[in-house]
Image (cartoon, helix red, strand yellow):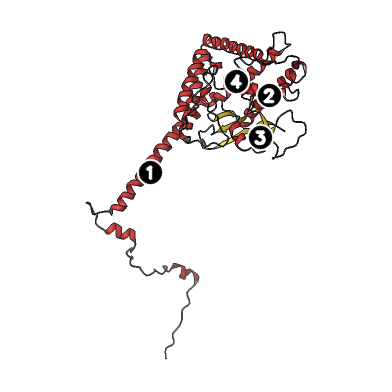
Amino acid sequence: MQTCQVLESTPDEASEQPPPVPPRKEPVERDTVEAQAEKAPLQTGPSAIDPAAQLRITELEQQLQAITQEWRKTARDLNELQARGEKSNQMNDGTLIERAVQLRYAIWTFSIQYFDSDTTTRKSTWWKKDAPYFYDLEDTTPSPSALESRLRHPTQRAKVVAAFLWRVLCNRVFDAFDWAGEDIGSSIHRLRRFLNASKSDQPGPSSTPEHLPWKIENRPRSLGEVVPRPEAEREFQMWSTATVELVLDVLDTHGSKAADAQEHLAERKDDISKSVKQLFKLDDESEGITDALKSILDDAFALDKIMSQQVARLEWVFDVKTLEKRGCRFDAETMEMDEGATDGVVDAGRKVCLVVAPALVKRGKSTGEDFDKERILLKRSVWCE
């Protein structure tokens, strides 16, 4: 009888044996939509695609084309802004607010220094109703009787004068481009007024006082007002900023034009100062009043120059009409108490008697975005009873 001997392989012998070969799997033919689509013959002719699907494809292609064009335009605008590099004079909100607060303080200090006393009550009427700037003074109060009573009141007079000076600046300094010279500044102003009106669906006021020939540019604005065409607003601001940069380049490279601009600016400051003094029957002997007025105007013209270089739109807004519609009540979200408030009480039920200083409102960003959004950088300063 033969026995079977089991031979145990050593580790070395086992390693020399080839590894087992896995059984070969036959390829499985894809049974997917993609595979079927690859196998399907290419169909042509009117019956290849459903008409509804074809219409949808066409619509999507048109949308894609529009988005692509808008993206390219935005990229060009962004490249233009980036190409300006250090020449760009875009300021952050903090700097703009600081300059605006500085101007507010200068106006309030002037009003307190020269009008918050009983010395002016020696005259029966110490303001001149036929003066060129009387319209700005009258615009501070809802009625002539209210104006007269507040001007005669020793503690209210300075507030009215401060409100009046702000209206003078908004009507005659800001957006007038006087810093660019008489010819260039007036040309930019007229062109801006034309383009500003054309981009809005709402017309400006139909009439304006004769002594305010260009007050029509900015129709009365309301806080939170919806811009009907934000893209047009954006394009307008981009054009305006580029135009101002060109003007500044010309003034920097042509000394004679810069000298002419400075001469015109000095004349404007003289004219405005004289008109203010004429309205309040102040003579040249009033100690320091001319220098104080010109100091305020220096700050205002400098701030206007800065604001005109910003891509974002910056506006001064009194918004008296909306205030009257809401019953003239204090609104902490859009208002703050004026510098002369002594009680420090902020009450939503208090009646607003006077908008002493306008709000500074910003629309858009320096990048050219968000022209459909509005932000209040500086609230209106109001006086309440």
Q: Where is residue 289 in the image (x, y as percent from the top left)?
A: 70, 13
Which is nearer the N-term, disc 2 or disc 1?
A: 1
Q: Is residue 131 left or right of residue 113?
A: left
Residue annotated with mark 4: 135
Which of the two discs, 4 and 2, labels the residue nearer the N terminus? 4
The numbered disc on residue 160 is 2
Q: Distance between the residues labelled 1 and 3?
A: 44 Å
Badge 1 crowding class, 10 Å Cα cut-off, few under 14, some 14 to 19, many 20 or more, is: few
Which residue shows up at 42% across the image and 37% down it?
A: 70
Using the rendered image of the protein, determine whether residue 303 is visible from the camera's viewpoint.
Answer: no
Regarding mark 3 in the picture, which secondary structure is present there?
strand
Task: Verify CB contact (< 8 Å) between mark 2 and mark 3.
Answer: no
Q: In which quarter of the image is residue 151?
A: top right
Amino acid type shown at disc 1: Gln
Which of pointers 4 and 1 indicates the residue nearer the eye? 4
**Image side of residue 67 versus residue 210, left or right:** left
Query: Residue 63 shows which numbered tag?
Result: 1
